Image (tube, grey):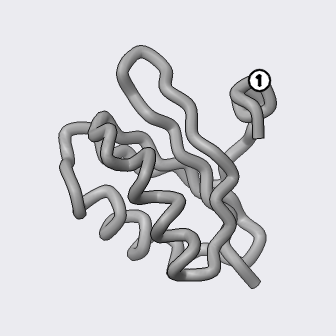
Amino acid sequence: MSDGAMKGMNADEVIDCVGLYCPMPIAHTARKIKEMKPGQVLEVLADDKGIKEDMPNWCKMTGNEFLGIEERDGVYHAFVRKSA
């Protein structure tokens, strides 16, 4: 997904993991995604650049859909759709 397409993406839930470092953004993502309904989109905010590799890998391992990531002003916005 291109960065342009993500800017208009509406997430159902947003979690702020700015200031947290590996593995905490993924741990918070895993906890939050369990509370969500299949098909809903979670936006994860983080300033740890490790999320660029960690989030797609976590999605592959868990079967959730990695929709993309973009950086805005030093904060990464990662988008994940909960699997059915």
Residue 49 falls in image quadrant: top left
Question: Relative to 21, does residue 64 appear above or below in the rendering?
Answer: below
Task: Give the residue at x 44% y 34%.
Answer: 76
- Hey, what amino acid is under mark 1? Gly
**Residue drawn at (42%, 41%) of the image:** 45
Q: Residue at x 30, y 34 (%)?
A: 47
In which quadrant will I find the N terminus? top right
Q: Position of residue 70 (x, y in %)?
A: 56, 31
Q: Position of residue 62 (x, y in %)?
A: 54, 81
* 34, above or below 24, in the image: below
Q: Position of residue 26 (x, y in %)?
A: 35, 64
**Residue under the point 32% across and 56% down:** 25
Residue 35 in sight in this render: no
- Residue identified by numbered label 1: 4
Residue 8 visible in the picture: yes
Residue 43, compared with residue 19, is above or below; it is below
**Secondary element at image label 1:** helix
Q: Residue furthest top?
A: 73
User: Where does the image place residue 48, in percent across and percent down from the top left?
Assistant: 27, 40
Tell me if 12 is positioned left or right of 2 in this view. left
Q: Quick check: 8 left or right of 24?
A: right
**Quadrant of the frame with the C terminus:** bottom right
Q: How many marks?
A: 1
Count neighbours of disc 1 (C-alpha within 10 A) and say few if under 14, some if 14 to 19, many if 20 or more. Answer: few
Please tell me which residue lies in front, 36 or 70. Answer: 70
